[in-house]
Amino acid sequence: MEKNQIFQRLNQVLKNSSSLYYHYPVAAILECHDGKLYPGVNIETSSPQAGICAERCAIFSAMADGYRKEHFQRIYLLNQTKNIITPCFICRQALHDYCNPDLEIVSYNILGESKTYLLKDLCQNAFGEDSLK
Ligand SMILES: [Zn+2]
């Protein structure tokens, strides 16, 4: 998807974040190989562990629709600060378990500046399925 389009769409998705407690809205859009887009937002709860981050919201939604790791091409992120963020370590675990190592993570700040990461670079020596054998 074209950069301006995705940034505009991320800003629309960001409005759906429910961040009443920590006031830190995040939007994600997961792009599948067939062009299908799955939005995700963080949903904060009064007990922090009960909420969910935008990345997992998007991926789990796609999985509920039948998509799997071989379909996931990239995930776009947007937060409302000037910082360019990377997924938290709980999300990195879920991404590691349910996405290909070459998944692109394109993260935007509120100014529209972005950086692109590869999942494998953010998850070196991660715990995973092989660790359980
Ligand atoms: Zn997270």
Image: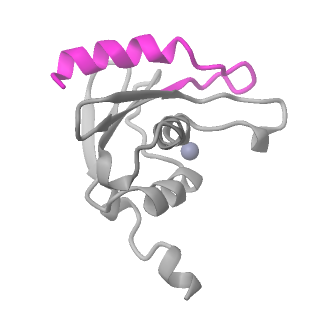
Q: Is residue 21 magenta?
A: yes
Above or below, 91 against 42 in this view is: below
Dividing the image into 4 quarters, which one contains the C terminus?
bottom right
Q: Residue at x 34, y 15 (%)?
A: 9
- Most extreme residue toward the left is 2
Dividing the image into 4 quarters, which one contains the N terminus?
top left
What range is drawn magenta here? 1-27
- Residue 111: image quadrant is top left
Q: Residue at x 41, y 65 (%)?
A: 123
Above or below, 122 against 42 in this view is: below
Where is residue 33? Give x, y as percent.
Answer: 23, 41
Where is residue 49? Give x, y as percent.
Answer: 77, 44
Q: Is residue 67 left or right of residue 132?
A: left
Above or below, 30 against 126 in this view is: above
Q: Is residue 77 magenta?
A: no
- Most extreme residue toward the front is 66
Where is residue 30? Give x, y as percent.
Answer: 37, 35
- Residue 96: image quadrant is bottom left
Q: Residue at x 32, y 46 (%)?
A: 72
Q: Is residue 44 left or right of residue 99?
A: right
Q: Quadrant of ligand 1?
A: top right
- Residue 46: image quadrant is top right
